[in-house]
Amino acid sequence: MKRQDIVKIIKEEKIIAIVRLEEQWEVPIVLEKLIELNIKVLEITSNTPGFTEEISKARKCYANSNVLIGAGTVTNEKIARKAIKAGAQFLVSPNTNIDVITIAHQNEIPVLMGALTPTEICTAVENGADFIKLFPAGSFGLDYFKTIKAPLNNVDFFIVGGINLLNVEDWMSAGASGVGLGSVLMEIVKSENSKETIENTVKQFLKKIKE
């Protein structure tokens, strides 16, 4: 799959599940639950134990599906190379690191580059970032995003940090291209609620994000 094909899927799906866990054995279980809930773009973060092994396993497991498996918390060139070797289909960073973009694009992989300030955002875009991961968005708030978005209206922003059912519609209405959901999704899928309750909660998220 070419880079632009992956970019197209990410734009269409509008939601990236951030799988950050303390125990490696939990990763395939959580991935399976999220995919069953119709989430198709998932990142396994580099600070999850055995993240490269789990990326490789997930790529093999879902090779014949329309699921994308990427790597998150890719803060530097070393991690980027490990993730790509493991089979990551996209990279996500919390910071602005141009080397990560260069390596990813050499391997036909898109990047959601972390940025917050106008300078960081413009630097990432000028160096080819496919998306900007505005992080930590929730800490700076919706008004900050609206102010940033006004002069940078052609940038595809994925909003990460502090997103929940109560505010996700506001972020999307303000011009976000999509969102990254981490702890809030982990809490839902790992909860002791009934399967029906979990499914309904995730459906609400998907509906608010996509509509």
Image: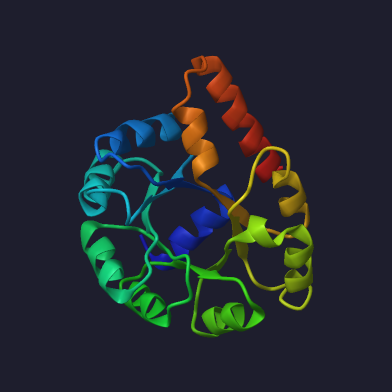
Residue 38 appears in the picture as rendered: no
Q: Is residue 119 left or right of residue 191?
A: right
Question: Which image quadrant: the N terminus?
Answer: bottom left
- On the image, the x and y values in percent for residue 80 come to 30, 68
201, above or below 64, in the image: above
Quadrant hosting residue 107: bottom left
- On the image, the x and y values in percent for residue 133 come to 55, 64
Q: Nearer the viewer, residue 104 or 116?
A: 116
- On the image, the x and y values in percent for residue 64 come to 30, 41
Q: How many marks?
A: 0
- On the image, the x and y values in percent for residue 138 come to 65, 55
Quadrant hosting residue 152: bottom right
Question: Which image quadrant: the C terminus?
Answer: top right
Residue at 27 percent across and 61 percent down: it is 83
Residue 123 appears in the picture as rendered: yes
175, above or below 125, in the image: above
Residue at 58 percent across and 53 percent down: it is 161
Identify the image's colour scheme: rainbow, by chain, secondary structure or one colour: rainbow
185, above or below 137, in the image: above
Residue at 77 percent across and 49 percent down: it is 170
Q: Is residue 23 left or right of residue 209?
A: left
Residue at 46 percent across and 43 percent down: it is 40
207, above or below 117, in the image: above
